[in-house]
Image (cartoon, grey):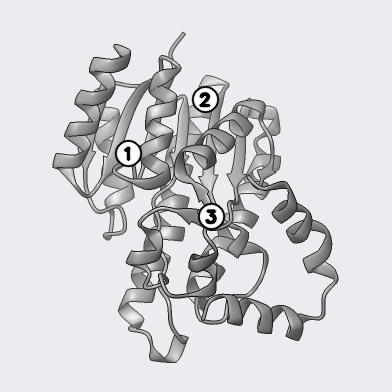
Amino acid sequence: MPNTALITGASSGIGLEFARYHAAKGGDLVLTARRNEVLEELKSELEAKHGIAAHVIALDLGAAGAADRLYDEVRALGVGIDILINNAGFGGHGHFLDRDLDADQAMIDLNITALVRLTHHVANDMAKRGGGKILNVGSTAGFAPGPNQAVYFATKAFVNSFSQAIAHEMQDKGVTCTVLAPGYVETGFAKAADLELTAMAKAGGATAADVARHGYDAMLRGELITINDRRLGFMMNWVLPLLPRRMVLRSVAANQS
């Protein structure tokens, strides 16, 4: 049975672990990220270890038109995508007015625009075939406003909301959409987003491998939204909504400082 996964942001962190986990289950892959050399190394590793087929498409998914080009290149390969994992994304620390506007726009372009366009293309193909699974990497950041990471938190709120809405719309088409909303994960994200000295990063987090396995398994079950930590899940779903908004804002701001 065909079992090909397209994974964005596959060169490191959670995306890399998604690729390893899927390949270990015998699934073929289309791997995309900016760094071709790293992707080629991963392709060689997974093909040799698991006997699967992996294709590499190196591009900057946040660039104008890149999601459309990626889809066209996947179609040119002649492979059907059974699983789409939208993992690519980045954050950025600092007060909104102090941050570079172009950097925040690039964040929106990758975290939201590219995800929406690629999902639209691939989900349409899945619906025509009568089945498929989508996993969008959101965040617990999407459950609250995020002072000191205002745009990043807002992009993840979009992913959390969008994923659940289209999951409902596609119920009768055989296509599921799951949003993985982890807390802090030990990857290169904190360094890239200038968050290494924040209280959040100092407290530590889950491993990328654990989070990837959790999200992938939830996707296979067709879950709507999943948080990898039970205590964090209880806080996000049952405590946070009841707290005064100003209290939430102060708490998040302190954690991101």
121 on left or right of 61: right
What's the residue at 65%, 41% (across, down)? 167
Task: From the top left corner, tell me how far across and down residue 97 is, in percent.
Answer: 43, 91
What's the residue at 46%, 59% (across, down)? 112
Helix, strand, or loop for circle 1?
Answer: helix
Helix, strand, or loop for circle 3?
Answer: loop
How crowded pointer 1 is (Cα within 10 Å; few <14, some 14-19, many 20+) is rated as some
Task: From the top left corner, tell me how far across and down residue 67 is, in percent.
Answer: 33, 48
Name the foreground residue: 103 vs 67: 103
How crowded pointer 2 is (Cα within 10 Å; few <14, some 14-19, many 20+) is rated as few
| Three-letter amino acid code at the position of disc 2 | Lys
| Residue at image mark 3 | 205
| Residue at image mark 2 | 128
Name the foreground residue: 122 vs 139: 139
Give the number of marks. 3
Q: Quadrant of residue 254?
A: bottom right
Q: Quadrant of residue 20?
A: top left
Query: Could you tell which of marks 3 and 2 lies nearer the N-terminus?
Result: 2
| Three-letter amino acid code at the position of disc 1 | Tyr
The residues bearing labels 1 and 3 have C-alpha atoms spaced at a distance of 33 Å
Task: From the top left corner, tell me how far across and down residue 26 is, in percent.
Answer: 41, 14
Query: Could you tell which of marks 2 and 1 lies nearer the N-terminus?
Result: 1
Closer to viewer: mark 1 or mark 3: 3
Q: Are marks 1 and 3 in contact (CB under 8 Å)?
A: no
| Residue at image mark 1 | 71
